[in-house]
Image (cartoon, helix red, strand yellow):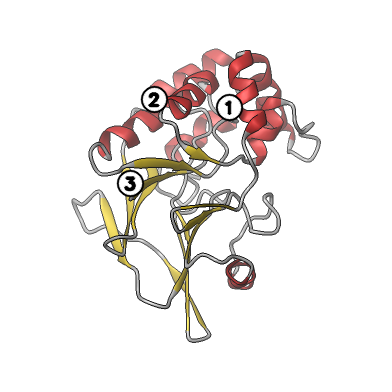
Amino acid sequence: MRYLILSDIHANATALDAALAAADGRWDRVACLGDLVGYGPDPNDVVERIRALDSAAIRGNHDRAGSGLADAEDFNPIARAAALWTRDQLRPENLAYLRDLPPGPVQVNGISLIHGAARDEDEYVVAPGQALACLLETSSAVNFFGHTHLQGGFSFHDNRLEAIQPRPEPGASFSALRLEKDWRYLLNPGSVGQPRDGDPRAAFAISDLEHQVVEFWRVPYEIPAVQKRMVSAGLHDSLVHRLALGR
């Protein structure tokens, strides 16, 4: 089964629509690694799209805060204001959906879905030691995680841990990673709605374990349209500006 792996959509329906359009016909089911909401202007639209896709989804920290499961006291002031705004905007059925999302890790068809780390859904996995600890705590050979908004990840084989940094060829929308037998992987599809790796394009991945390949995708979307909605919603200027920078 081919999975479209989405993470950190952050209430950006325009970016989500661009990702779905680019991946059309290339996947059988959607898996979402959390943070459907937060920061962006379209919390209801995004939740309803993910619900309609019958996605295999887990929660993120912004889903907990936006749905009222967490008080967001550990957020910075800008993120907390966005979480409280999100909570006020969400319709009851979408609040209920977010509250019912399970924490990771969740296994689906041979892959593990994780938001932060296997042992702590709020941990940002960026260092090799963190990645190795996460891999040692999961039973799947292929694991997908989010939270950092950084596309890439790690491979582990024969006691060697290596970083993976996808680089699409010029003119290409994706780069393909061939999965090796007996290797283990901890892979981040990047953020659909708020990338932070210097590339503002929407990021996602497509996992095809039957053919042992993962594609890391980047697609452009109409960032000014999203920024305009954010301004109208009264979201903080820093959130508006960072979309165009990919930071």
Left or right: residue 149 compared with residue 19: right
Q: Of the residues under marks 2 and 1, which one precedes in the sequence?
A: 2
State the separation of the CA atoms marked 2 and 1.
Answer: 13 Å
The structure residue drawn at horizontal position 58% and vertical position 48%, both measured from the top left corner, is 147
Q: In the rendered view, would you say 229 is above or below 59?
A: above
Element carrying mark 1: helix
| Residue corresponding to mark 1 | 237
Left or right: residue 105 compared with residue 223: right
| Residue corresponding to mark 2 | 224
Residue 68's disc number: none
Q: Residues within 10 Å of mark 2 (few under 14, many from 20)?
A: few
Q: Is residue 90 visible?
A: no
Q: Amino acid at mark 3?
A: Arg
Tell me the quarter of the picture where residue 17 sits: top left
Q: Nearer the viewer, residue 194 or 133?
A: 133
The structure residue drawn at horizontal position 46% and vertical position 52%, both measured from the top left corner, is 197
Residue 218's disc number: 3
